[in-house]
Image (cartoon, rainbow, N blue to C red):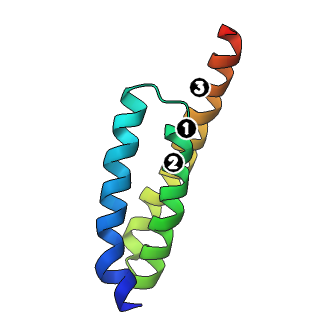
Amino acid sequence: MQLIAEYLPWLLSAITIYMTILAGNRARHAWLLGLVNQGLWLIWIVSTASWGLIPMNLALWVVYARNHLKWTASNKALQ
């Protein structure tokens, strides 16, 4: 558990920054990467008992899923 608490935040930060860059560049899989990252965030939240971050995690699951669905529908409409 200590490895998760100490090292996972570094990976979470890197993925979050990379996903944000991908989204800004309109990369197709940006929001899916964000969803995977939220799963990792949830592991960290539970492992460190950082319960105050649960509302953020839940909200971002919804936002990233919504954005992914909207971008998928938008791309299909353009084809």
Q: Amino acid at mark 3?
A: Trp
Q: CA distance from mark 2 to mark 3?
A: 14 Å
Q: Are marks 2 and 3 in contact (CB under 8 Å)?
A: no
Q: Residue furthest top?
A: 78
Could you tell me the amino acid type at mark 2?
A: Leu
Q: Residue at x 49, y 74 (%)?
A: 43
Q: Which residue is mark 3?
A: 71
User: Furthest-bottom residue in view?
Assistant: 2
- Mark 2: secondary structure: helix
- Looking at the image, is mark 2 or mark 3 earlier in the sequence? 2
Q: Which residue is mark 1?
A: 29
Q: Which residue is mark 2?
A: 33
Image coordinates for residue 46, horizontal then vertical, percent: 47, 79
Residue sitting at 65 percent across and 27 percent down? 72
SS at circle 3: helix
- Using a 10 Å C-alpha cutoff, classify the residue at mark 3 as few (fewer than 14 neighbours), some (14 to 19) or many (20 or more): some
The kind of secondary structure element at disc 1 is loop
Q: Are marks 2 and 1 in contact (CB under 8 Å)?
A: yes
Front residue of 64 and 9: 9
Q: Is residue 67 above or below residue 17?
A: above
3 or 1: mark nearer the eye? 1
Residue 79, image x, y percentages: 70, 9
1 on left or right of 67: left
Where is the N terminus found, in terms of image quarters? bottom left
Q: In whole angstroms, how far apart are the C-alphas of marks 3 and 1?
A: 10 Å
Task: Please name the amino acid that badge 1 sits on.
Answer: His
Work out whether 30 lies above or below 15.
above
